[in-house]
Image (spheres, helix red, strand yellow):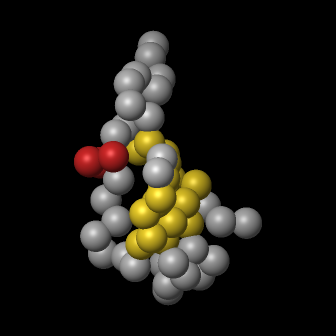
Amino acid sequence: MKPLILTEKPSKAYADDFSVRKYEGYSEIKPCPIFPLGAHIIWGMSVILSN
């Protein structure tokens, strides 16, 4: 199963160090030593959690 990385907004979805394919609403990290199966990066456009 691929890891899911949740970020606050697209500008916080740091993927510059990985080979990434961008889609509308998410990005996909291609398999690499850190994520052997790859990973998905998603983001919210407003408050995700509040206390």
Which residue is depicted at the point 44% across and 17% down? 50
Q: Residue at x 50, y 84 (%)?
A: 32
Quick check: 33 above or below 3? below
In terms of image quadrants, where is residue 35? bottom right
Left or right: 20, with 33 as reference point: left
Task: Give above or below for 47 relative to 8.
Answer: above
Q: Is 49 or 9 nearer to us in this picture?
A: 9
Residue 9, given in percent of the width and then of the height, sits at 34, 40
Please tell me how many numbered marks the rendered image carries.
Answer: 0
Question: Residue at 47% across / 23% down in the picture?
Answer: 49
On the image, the x and y values in percent for residue 47 come to 40, 22
Which quadrant of the rendered structure holds the C terminus?
top left
34 or 38: nearer the viewer? 38
Q: Quadrant of residue 17?
A: bottom left
> In the image as oriented, which residue stretches furthest toward the bottom?
33
**Which one is in front, 14 or 51?**
14
Residue 40's place in the image compared with 18, above or below, is above
Compared with 13, 31 (above or below) is below
Left or right of residue 7: residue 12? left
Relative side of 18 to 16, left or right: right
The quadrant the N terminus occupies is bottom right
Q: Position of residue 20 (x, y in %)?
A: 42, 72
